[in-house]
Image (cartoon, grey):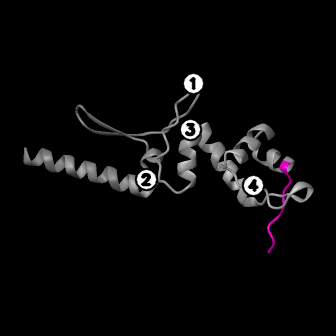
Amino acid sequence: MEDKKYTFEELCTLTGVSSRTLRYYIQIGLVDKPIGQTRGAHYLSLHIEKILRIKQLTEAGISLERIREVLSGSPMPLPERTKKPGDISVRTHLWVGEGIELEVSAETAGLSPEKLRQFLKGVMQAYEQVKKDA
């Protein structure tokens, strides 16, 4: 199956990146040059994926130099997004005992609902064991 071909203008529209910015990314080598030359030049879905990844990283506040490293394969933890007024955060609160409360953000912790329940159950068991041993 042949990959769809996109013009420069289509690439800008599909990614939401200005033509000036996209030309700059191509110039500094963040985005590959088009396939072909002059009027026959075109881009593929791989170009779109790379541009969207660059856009995601720049919106997270990552420098273009660090983005270059990431795109070349260097592992990188993404910084936590800064919270803005109106953002919603869902958390689970577990009242363990007098003076002990546990707050968990399952999404940030990367826990499925099953794993979260398992974790909370383990916390309660550990607390009961500590109380019994005291």
**Tag 2 residue:** 111
Residue 115 counted in the magenta span: no
Q: Position of residue 127 (x, y in %)?
A: 20, 46
- Distance, label 4 to label 3, CA atoms, is 21 Å
| Circle nearer the viewer, 1 or 3 | 3
Q: Picture coordinates of residue 4 (x, y %)? A: 83, 64
Q: Quadrant of residue 58?
A: top right
* Three-letter amino acid code at the position of disc 1: Pro
The first of marks 2 and 4 along the sequence is 4
Residue that appears at 56% across and 38% down = 63
For label 4, the residue is 33
Picture residue at 53% right of the left edge, 30% below the top: 83
**Amino acid under label 3?**
Ser
Query: Magenta region, mostly helix, strand or loop?
Result: loop
Point out the tag, 4 or 3, that comes first from the N-terminus: 4
Residue of label 1 = 85
Q: Which residue is mark 3?
A: 63
Q: Nearer the viewer, residue 92 or 79?
A: 79
Mark 3, Cα crowd under 10 Å, few <14 / some 14-19 / many 20+, is few
Whether residue 42 sits left or right of residue 80 in the image: it is right
Badge 4: residue crowd in 10 Å (few <14, some 14–19, many ≥20):
some
Q: Which residues are magenta?
A: 1-8
Residue at 57% x, 45% y is 67
